[in-house]
Image: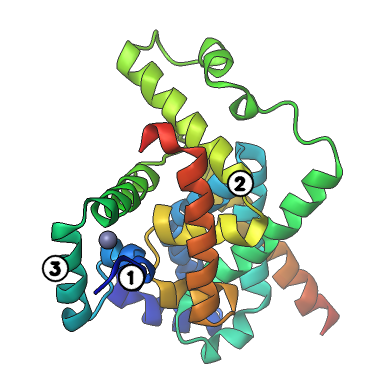
Amino acid sequence: MTCGEVQPFIEDYADNSLDEHTKKQVKEHIDICPDCQGDFDISVSLKVLLRAFTTEEPECDYFEKATSLIIAKTSSEASKSEEVH
Amino acid sequence: MSDQIPELVKGFVSGDEADFAELIRIFRRKIYSVAYKFLGNHLDADEVVQETFVRIYRKRKELGNVKYFSTFLVRVASNYSIDLLRKRKGHSGRDDDTNSLPGNVQLVLSKKVPTPSEEYENKRLMTEIKLALDQLPPRQKLTAILHDVEGFTKSEVADILECPKATVRSNLHIARSKLKRILKDRL
Ligand SMILES: [Zn+2]
């Protein structure tokens, strides 16, 4: 495979979503081509970085509070619609 | 955990409130996480969590035809999040949110105990990623968050966003190309 042929597969290779045959061909090229190896490394680094992306945790009782609010809201809607029928 | 979901959905559809509560417990963190990463602040993420489950409750009669409850749920949350983002962009944004501030300002305002330098560095990095994602258009941003951050498969993302898998792939490719450029010093 040439660089041009390998390029469209680099992200899929980093995602590990290529079929075995294509994977083998891409790997053979990347092993001998520093440019494509570099692109592959950047794709992997980005994946690692994004997987590590976290946001702040809400206060510890937030989820229980939110659940209670949701249930209160839906129960009142349910009883209202029963009154109508 | 996931094998109990079809049973819980069945119970919920037939009016079992306890099953509804259990479904909320199982999925609330995931919804919050996607919404927070997409919208960037607690108040909006909270609104998405509450509104998503209220909408699911209203649509419960349709759930019998839903193949995958979790992707259906994330779809409702995603659609609402996109609407909310558009609405917020029309206004000046939420000023009361400390997470929209640069990392160092955020650190000063943090309620946490004094932060070691590692945590400081990590916070800076998270802020950089957030700002990079913020530069993407909504659909690309959501695709990157769902697939690359939250770990949904391309098929699941296609199901959530109701688009062909090819669209997910191309949005992901464009999003990643931009992110690589913006975050190049970190890669
Ligand atoms: Zn090459």
Mark 2 → mark 1, Cα distance in angstroms = 35 Å
Depth check, front residue: B102 or A83: B102
User: Is B85 left or right of A44, judged from the image as shown?
Assistant: right
Q: Say whether residue A85 is visible.
A: yes
- Return the residue at label 1: A9
Task: Say which amino acid is labelled 1.
Answer: Phe
Question: Chain ID for label 1?
Answer: A
Mark 1 → mark 3, Cα distance in angstroms = 13 Å
Query: Quarter-wise, where is residue B57 in the image?
Result: bottom right
Q: Give above or below for A51 relative to B43.
A: below
Q: Position of residue B147 (x, y in %)?
A: 43, 62
- The nearer-to-camera label among 1 and 3 is 3
Are discs 3 and 2 both within one chain? no
- Return the residue at label 2: B45
Q: What crowding class fits label 1: few (fewer than 14 Cα within 10 Å), some (14-19), or many (20 or more)? A: some
Q: Position of residue B19 (x, y in %)?
A: 45, 71
- Is disc 3 in contact with disc 2, using a CB cutoff of under 8 Å? no
The structure residue drawn at horizontal position 37% and vertical position 60%, both measured from the top left corner, is B151
Q: What crowding class fits label 2: few (fewer than 14 Cα within 10 Å), some (14-19), or many (20 or more)? A: many
Q: Say whether residue A72 is visible.
A: no
Mark 3 → mark 2, Cα distance in angstroms = 45 Å
Instruction: Check the picture and name the quadrant holding the N terminus of chain B.
Output: bottom left
Question: Chain ID for label 2?
Answer: B
Depth check, front residue: A76 or A45: A45
Task: Say which amino acid is labelled 2.
Answer: Ala
Q: Earlier in the sequence, mark 1 or mark 3?
A: 1
- Return the residue at label 3: A28
Q: What SS does tag 1 mark?
A: helix
Count of numbered circles on the image: 3
Q: What SS does tag 2 mark?
A: helix
The structure residue drawn at horizontal position 20% and vertical position 57%, both measured from the top left corner, is A33
Q: What SS does tag 3 mark?
A: helix
